[in-house]
Image (spheres, helix red, strand yellow):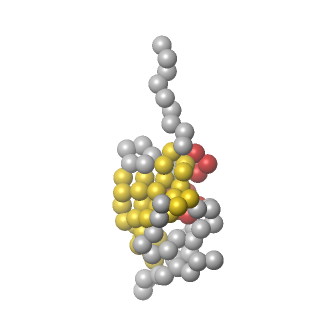
Amino acid sequence: MNEPSPTSNGTLRILFLNSHGGGFADHLNVPAGTTIAQLIERQLPHVKADDLLIRVNRQPVQRDYVLQADDRVSATPTKIAGAVVV
């Protein structure tokens, strides 16, 4: 198991890249010990994690991965609603 490196206030700073919808990139402070599943539930509450390709530092991770300081997290939809044929 990987060990988090918390700041003095018990949080970690990560970069979250959201490719869902309009998409954004933002630095977040998360509590030490936060898993990738907890982060996705918090940041994208109306999205099923199974519909996302989730990577940390460009590598796919399991849902129990514990975030580390300076991790780069990306969430990209694997299912995109398309146009209706008329």
23 vs 61, nearest the viewer:
61
49 vs 72, nearest the viewer:
72
| Residue name at image x 43 percent, y 53 percent | 18
Relative to 34, does residue 47 appear above or below in the rendering?
above
**Residue that lies at the very extreme toward the top in this rendered image:** 86
Where's residue 66, x and y in %? 57, 71
Relative to 67, does residue 18 appear above or below in the rendering?
above
Where's residue 74, x and y in %? 46, 57
**Residue that lies at the very extreme toward the front in this rendered image:** 59
Where's residue 41, x and y in %? 55, 57
| Residue name at image x 54 percent, y 43 percent | 78
Quarter holding residue 14: bottom left
Q: Is residue 40 visible?
A: no
Image quadrant where one finds the N terminus: bottom right
| Residue name at image x 51 percent, y 32 percent | 81
Where's residue 57, x and y in %? 47, 64
| Residue name at image x 51 percent, y 45 percent | 77
Quarter holding residue 2: bottom right
Relative to 78, does residue 8 appear above or below in the rendering?
below
Left or right: 41 as drawn, with respect to 74:
right
Relative to 44, does residue 10 appear above or below in the rendering?
below
Q: How many labels, in total?
A: 0
Q: Is residue 65 visible?
A: yes
